[in-house]
Image (cartoon, rainbow, N blue to C red):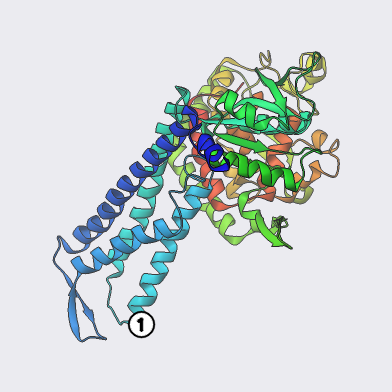
């Protein structure tokens, strides 16, 4: 009888669950094929550029013989594909969203480079530096672009309600809403909440939970999860904070979901902590989630300073024609200086003069008090969607964030970073509490998480949350992703006014 019941559960896998497994396998297979093409292309390109073809030999002193670079290329190709597999760069847990996929690709590639260097040294292989200097950077960049292209494809599919992961959230009203809101903030990740189970279940007063523009129905209690999974066809259950669900209940839920092919993810209530700072450590057969302390000093590292300087110098040179055109437009549109200098508070609370193209009429700051009733911002931040102080040219510059281009000069002077928290006014800082004041532990940025997550559309509290999350979870890969997203957001003038 027990075996029959188990087989019945096995056969009750929903269409949504089978569909998820199908598209995930299809997506991973496509990544494997294109990864192969990219690696082969990068290595062969390096060989053709360096040697003009498949010819060329290198000395293998340990064996006293010459080895063709075609053999070396084949070994590197096989090794590269192997480390991509070993580091699980195509795991369904990381592909399609977040920085972890890119981090694993970079880690795998640098590890391979290190292995090749060590083997070449020990085996006394005289490898041409130019060959490696082309193959590895070209291959790494191409792998990143390949994954980015597939993410764009997945995003388009998800916009058409494909490549979706259907999620049933289980937890208290507050925790369930927070989890659903986190999924809603990242629609491109493909998590679609189809229902919620709370300890009380639906009542006459509360039958749904509002998350943004959505009203997600409460379909059951935390004791009817299995029935609700079958009802909704969810392929993933997200278990969040609930007082009524103990370790034994979680274990039983895992057993119940396993024959259905439904995944269980547990959200521990730790928000805005990057994955690299979380580590599971079993203690007495109980998994403990260890949260590493924020490494604030990493944001002041020599590597970040060097990146800021060289990126700002290159960007300033590249956009100089645009800046000249903007300066002429500002000067001819309205009387006053080309640049607007505003005191902002930077690293460790030190003030500096932030430079922007002037987008308002002269003495616009004197009219802030009169317009305060029409403030669209929250907290101490003043924002106004149809600000009468903005000039016609200024409105265009703001739409595409061109007024902020002179801030690269602040970066070159060491007052700002390319990526960081939004530079605050002194009047804002005076209203900071101890938590918000942590924003001053790093240099403010020309762009940041706030810039790529809604810009002017963000509430004050949401902007603060994003800035603090950036500071505590900084990584160079994250900076590069923010820069890429900034270019897309600015090109689409998303959330700017």
- Give the secondary structure at mark 1: helix
Q: Residue at x 46, y 28 (%)?
A: 15
User: Which quadrant would residue 418 be assigned to in this image?
Assistant: top right
In the depicted view, which residue is nearer to us: 306 or 328? 306
Left or right of 272, for residue 436: right
Q: Residue at x 25, y 85 (%)?
A: 61
Left or right of 251, for residue 115: left
Q: Residue at x 36, y 60 (%)?
A: 82
Left or right of 160, for residue 454: right
User: Which quadrant would residue 160 be assigned to in this image?
Assistant: top left
Q: Is residue 82 above or below residue 335?
A: below
How packed is label 1: few (under 14 Cα within 10 Å), some, or many (20 or more)?
Answer: few
Q: Is residue 112 above or below residue 381?
A: below
Q: Is residue 474 above or below residue 207?
A: below
Quarter in which the C terminus is drawn:
top right
In the depicted view, which residue is nearer to us: 352 or 332? 352
In the depicted view, which residue is nearer to us: 122 or 267? 267
In the depicted view, which residue is nearer to us: 27 or 170? 170
Residue 351 percent across, percent down from the top left = 76, 44
Q: Residue at x 56, y 51 (%)?
A: 308
Residue 456 percent across, percent down from the top left = 65, 25
Q: Which residue is mark 1?
A: 122
Quarter in which the N terminus is drawn:
top right
Does any portion of residue 482 appear in the rendered image? no
Does any portion of residue 87 appear in the rendered image? yes
Furthest-front residue in this view: 1
Residue 377 percent across, percent down from the top left = 74, 23
Count of all numbered marks drawn on residues in the image: 1
Residue 69 percent across, percent down from the top left = 20, 68
């Amino acid at each position: 009888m027990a075996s029959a019941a188990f087989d019945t559960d096995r056969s009750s896998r929903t269409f949504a669950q089978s569909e998820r497994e199908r598209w995930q396998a299809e997506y991973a297979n496509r990544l494997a094929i294109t990864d192969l093409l990219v690696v082969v292309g990068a290595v062969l390109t390096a060989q053709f550029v360096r040697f003009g073809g498949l010819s060329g030999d290198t000395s293998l002193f340990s064996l006293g013989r010459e080895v063709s670079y075609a053999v070396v290329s084949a070994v590197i190709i096989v090794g590269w594909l192997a480390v991509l597999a070993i580091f699980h760069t195509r795991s369904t847990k990381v592909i399609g969203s977040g920085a972890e996929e890119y981090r694993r690709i970079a880690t795998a590639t640098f590890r391979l480079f290190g292995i090749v260097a060590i083997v070449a040294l020990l085996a006394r292989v005289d490898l041409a530096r130019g060959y490696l200097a082309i193959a590895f950077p070209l291959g790494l960049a191409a792998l990143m672009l390949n994954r980015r292209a597939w993410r764009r494809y997945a995003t388009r599919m998800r916009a058409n309600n494909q490549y979706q992961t259907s999620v049933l959230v289980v937890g208290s009203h507050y925790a369930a809403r927070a989890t659903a809101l986190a999924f809603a903030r990242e629609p491109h990740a493909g998590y679609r909440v189809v229902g919620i189970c709370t300890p009380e279940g639906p009542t006459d007063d509360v039958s749904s939970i509002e998350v943004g523009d959505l009203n997600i129905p409460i379909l059951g209690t935390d004791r009817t999860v299995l029935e609700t999974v079958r009802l909704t066809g969810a392929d993933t259950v997200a278990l969040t904070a609930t007082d009524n669900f103990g370790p034994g209940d979680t274990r039983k839920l895992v057993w119940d979901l396993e024959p259905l092919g439904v995944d269980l993810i547990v959200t521990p209530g730790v928000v805005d902590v990057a994955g690299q700072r979380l580590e599971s450590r079993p203690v007495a057969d109980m998994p403990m989630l260890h949260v590493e302390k924020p490494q604030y000093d990493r944001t002041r590292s020599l590597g970040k300073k060097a990146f800021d300087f060289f990126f700002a110098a290159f960007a300033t040179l590249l956009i100089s024609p645009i800046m000249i055109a903007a300066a002429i437009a500002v000067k001819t549109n309205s009387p006053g200086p080309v640049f607007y200098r505003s005191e902002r508070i930077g690293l460790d609370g030190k003030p500096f003069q932030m430079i922007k193209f002037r987008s308002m009429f002269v003495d616009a700051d004197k009219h802030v008090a009169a317009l305060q009733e029409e403030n669209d911002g929250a907290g101490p931040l003043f924002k106004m969607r149809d600000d009468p102080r903005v000039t016609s040219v200024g409105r265009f510059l703001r739409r595409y964030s061109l007024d902020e281009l002179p801030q690269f000069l602040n970066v070159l002077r060491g007052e700002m970073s390319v990526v960081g928290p939004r530079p605050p006014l002194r009047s804002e800082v005076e209203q900071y509490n101890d938590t918000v004041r942590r924003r001053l532990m790093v240099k403010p940025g020309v762009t940041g998480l706030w810039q790529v997550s809604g810009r002017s559309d963000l509430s004050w509290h949401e902007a603060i949350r994003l800035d603090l999350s950036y500071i505590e979870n900084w990584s160079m890969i994250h900076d590069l992703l923010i820069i890429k997203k900034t270019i897309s957001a600015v090109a689409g003038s998303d959330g700017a006014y």
